[in-house]
Amino acid sequence: MRDLPYNQVLVVGGGLAGLRAAIEAADRGVDVAVLSLVPPVRSHSGAAQGGVNGALANAEDGRDDTPERHAFDTVKGSDYLGDQDAIQIMADEAPARIIEMEHWGCPFSRTKDGKIAQRPFGGGGFPRTCYAADKTGHYMLHTLYEQAVKRRVKVYMEWASAYFVVDGRRVGGVVAFHLPTGQFEAFQADAVIMATGGYGRIYARSTNAIINTGYGMAMAYLAGAPLEDMEFVQFHPTTLLGNNILMTEGARGEGGLLFNAKGERFMERYAPTAKDLAPRDMVARAIQTEINEGRGFPGGYVNLDLRRLGKQKIMERLPGIRDICISFSGVDPITDPIPIQPGQHYSMGGIGTDVWGQSELPGLFAAGECACVSVHGANRLGGNSLLDTVLFGKRAGERAAQVVKGKPAPRNEKAAQAALERVRKAYAGLIAGTGKEDPNQIRDEMRESMFELVGIFRTQDKLVQAVRKLGELSERYRRVRACYDGKKFNWDLVRTFELGGQLLVAEVIAKGALARQESRGSHYRVDFPNRDDQSWLKHTLAHYSSQGPVLKYKPVTVAKWQPEARKY
Amino acid sequence: MLVIKSLGPDERSKGVEKSYLMANKKAVFNVFRFDPDKEKEPHYDTFSVEVKVKMSVLEALFEILEKQDNTLAFRFSCRGAICGSCAMFISGKYRLACETLVEKLDPRGIEVAPLPHLRILKDLAVDMEPFYRKFDRIMPFFQEGKQKVEREYIQAIRERKEIDEITDCILCAACESACPLTWTSDYLGPAVLTKAYRFVADSREGATKERLSLVDGEDGVWRCHTIFNCVEACPKRINQTRAIEKLRKGLFARKLGFK
Ligand SMILES: Cc1cc2nc3c(=O)[nH]c(=O)nc-3n(C[C@H](O)[C@H](O)[C@H](O)COP(=O)(O)OP(=O)(O)OC[C@H]3O[C@@H](n4cnc5c(N)ncnc54)[C@H](O)[C@@H]3O)c2cc1C
């Protein structure tokens, strides 16, 4: 029998979290490879605009900033659901991770005295967000890719991972499908680090890349790793009307303002102190309220006005935003306000891990947006996610390297072959389908239902309806029409396969939201408008069962800061 | 070599096209199809797609994939003009499919073809591997200088400006495809040289000398004929030719003993 590919550590996903994990493992002398659906630089991380948080205290009006304050802002921003030990680690290690990126060549923008420039972001007490114009993710991603190349990290490109190789509960590799050739392969490893990003595309109106299906989370869930806090879905206040491309929070950080159709600065009413720079959940709800109550523009939007920044500042600080507005919408922010609406943006929840990226399954780690450490709790602050990717990516790489170096897990070829067979069968089943249902139609209905029923404003009725709808869609998914049987770039097959996993993840989100009878951060229940620390200061853990998710709960780690009312 | 046929004028006689679009609400797409393992030559398939407001060519390709022909091969990811997956040759120009609005093209015949001169894997997907591999020849990563610093390197705003444009590259390979010198030789090409210059121009970099040597030689900067095809093809408006020119100046200075 031919040898299956084997690496000590296999990282699934080539975004910031995956690359940082791989670099760390390589630096610790273990054989590591990255397996990714798209070439690493095509990952969604590249679309991040605004910046990355760290208390460097470089800005003139930010000299008093400290990791302590960063930690507090994050705890408060999370609506006290974030684990304070993990948040403290993140805030403490942030400056080192950012300086390291700079030493690897990341072209951050500069202050007058030549240091890394920082701008204010929502929910942050100081200008703490280090930026490179409005293309921070692009620059960071290319920088990390360069560093991975430098270390000769092997990259398996354009492979869609489908299932894990499992030996009991131990994860020992991944079975994947090669897009360019249609080949299946079992990649064996002593540790697997999932870094597959968010699930944005389960929702309509998402800022996420088309490839952000969330399938990686489904994979872990199916293998028995619980998904944590999945009901917390971030809606970004400002996405471009129509295609929902992100208009960074940095636009407001630089001084942009929101106006409704009556020309009012409505944020003054919702967050009297922080106004337009209140945290995302609050601004998104405010905008949606304005629209719902008839103070938006026809078509359902409000205006983000950058004109007051002037041409020079826009060209210098927000050139990417301007290009996007012109190309995609025909609006030049130098002369016109930008039509915006809230859209799905980020998944606070994910594969539950400890502060070293270790999941509940031996051999399985996770980092980045697909993981939940949890540092973002019920609402992530802008600029904390890029930080999360490189910081906990590094930690996952470090721990995985230690684990595989200590005692290499015995390789189990039989388990690998079995997993390979399972994937072959699943794909073959889709090609041999005899049903009539159109997978694209099912996907569209799932996305619309999630946005309408499990969106910014939630109620018992809507959530019950969502659960019913998702059940119906899963039922229909079983009767989907035959997929294309071609070998090369068979998107019909891969996307239909992934849809099955997406429906599972959607169900976890909806059921978690239905169960949580309170409002906290991004999870807003119109029928339970208050936060309820007595009953709900706890993390949701969704375990897979064939009857649907089994919800369990675990306590939040509270250290320095007792929960208080969250006012801005 | 494949000949790409151009169908219909692009961005001309706006009036006629607008009224066509208004009347029909549909656009005609002529999409390049080819599976080299199964077919002798490529052909074009014609699809009629209902056009929504601000619809992009990439969205139109998805309409085709999902509703009309589930065998179509193409690449995509961010749909926001930053990941570089979907560079194609659309109605006679190099463009990113995601940022090209259908309403800006002649709806009577929008031609969608893969990047010319790269090997076709299937339909609109080309073999990018040789392009990626080329970067290995220039040490494609930042090298810290000898002087170690604890905090960030100090870089003046003016120095940072030097690398502003060239760090925008999204590795989409449009320039590589447009440069005739890459078609017939082992020339490093505009994207790879721009990447090299990105490091040379960085005030923080410590390996300028070695890197300049790597771009010297006949397959390096000297092969550029300054015909600016790359500049015209670039969706990010990067001036690769200027970057190459600057590398040449650096080499000149060294050869003449200035540095
Ligand atoms: C438009 C936008 C702007 C943002 N701006 C900011 C910002 O300014 N600051 C901030 O802190 N955060 C920002 N965020 C959030 C942040 O960018 C993301 O959370 C973060 O980049 C995610 O990184 P990641 O490495 O976890 O995943 P990704 O970068 O999404 O990478 C996922 C990787 O997994 C691979 N993959 C996925 N599925 C599979 C599979 N089945 N098989 C194999 N490989 C697979 C993909 O190929 C990809 O390489 C922004 C997000 C968006 C959407």
Image (cartoon, coloured by chain):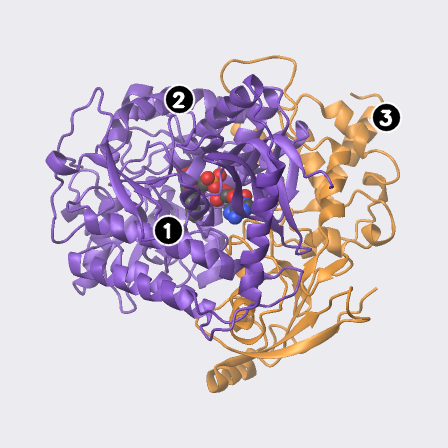
Chain colours: A purple, B orange
**Which residue is label 1 attached to?**
A505
Q: Position of residue A526 (x, y in %)?
A: 14, 53
Q: Residue at x 42, y 70 (%)?
A: A441
- Sequence-wise, which precedes: disc 1 or disc 2? 2
For numbered disc 1, what is the local secondary structure?
helix
Image quadrant in which you'd find residue B212: top right
Please determine whether, in this image, residue A409 is positioned above or below residue A335.
above
Tell me if B83 is positioned left or right of A86 in this view: right
**Which residue is label 3 attached to?**
B255
Number of residues whose C-alpha sits closer than 10 Å to that of mark 2, classed few (under 14), some (14–19) or many (20 or more): many
Kindly identify the amino acid type of the residue bearing the numbered disc 1.
Answer: Val
Q: How many angstroms separate mark 2 from mark 3 (CA)? A: 42 Å
The quarter in which the N terminus of chain A is drawn is: top right
Kindly identify the amino acid type of the residue bearing the numbered disc 2.
Answer: Leu
Q: Are dots 2 and 3 in contact, CB under 8 Å?
A: no
> Looking at the image, is mark 2 or mark 3 nearer the viewer?
2
Q: Chain of mark 2?
A: A
**Which residue is label 2 attached to?**
A56
Number of residues whose C-alpha sits closer than 10 Å to that of mark 3, classed few (under 14), some (14–19) or many (20 or more): few
